[in-house]
Image (tube, rainbow, N blue to C red):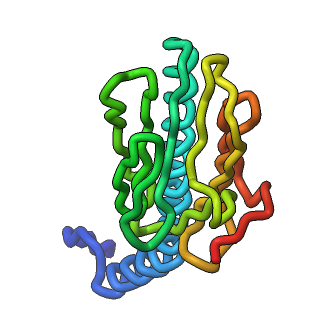
Amino acid sequence: MLIVSNKKGFTLLELIVAIAIMGLITAFAAPNFLELLQNREMRSQAAAISEVMSSARSTALSKAGAVEVCWNNTASADTFGGPNVNLQPGQMVMIDTSVADNVGRLFEYQSTNFFIDDSVAAADEPCVVFGAQGRANITPGFLVCRRQGDDSRAVTVSVLNSGRSTVVEGNTRGLSCD
């Protein structure tokens, strides 16, 4: 005689095994997902720096006048640029020198989540001037790292002589996040 059961569903053992498998998958996927998010944020940070440089170059070309970009990569507030702009650590300013009041546009370029180093010598003022033809007077580079001392998976932003800026994966300019 055939006995037909009307009971439907999962046993407790089947549910425990399924939950354990989902837990293992999550445990392996979470670190990779966090690393993916950190890398994306780091590339976004580098793209923001590049965008400021590109915007300054475009402004210099369109107005046929000099535009200056200064940044503060120190641990304390300091004064930079032609109009002596007071910048807090991690701030960048774009100054259109053809405007009478020389008021610049401020950008936060250094998040607390990242360490950013530049290629400008400590004795030099950290400013680049884009001339009327869009060319840069210096060619700074920025290395965006996850944290100080960790150059792995860094992203480099370079300003070329032509004034164009590029973003490249890796440390292409020999900079250090120390």
**Quarter of the image with the N terminus in it:** bottom left
Please name the residue shown 55% across and 69% down the image.
146
19 over 132 or under it: above or below? below
**Quarter of the image with the C terminus in it:** bottom right
Taking the image as shown, residue 27 lies to the left or right of residue 134, namely left
Q: Quadrant of residue 139?
A: top right
Q: Quadrant of residue 76?
A: bottom left
Please name the residue shown 35% across and 43% down the image.
106
Taking the image as shown, residue 167 lies to the left or right of residue 49, namely right
Taking the image as shown, residue 129 lies to the left or right of residue 159, namely left
Please name the residue shown 28% across and 85% down the image.
12
Q: How many marks?
A: 0
Nearer to us in this view, 150 or 92: 92
Please name the residue shown 50% across and 47% down the image.
70
Percent coordinates x, y for residue 145 in the rendering: 59, 66
Q: Quadrant of residue 131?
A: top right
Q: Residue furthest left?
A: 6
Taking the image as shown, residue 63 lies to the left or right of residue 120, namely left
Nearer to us in this view, 105 or 82: 82
165 over 146 or under it: above or below? above
Percent coordinates x, y for residue 99 in the rendering: 37, 22
29 over 156 or under it: above or below? below
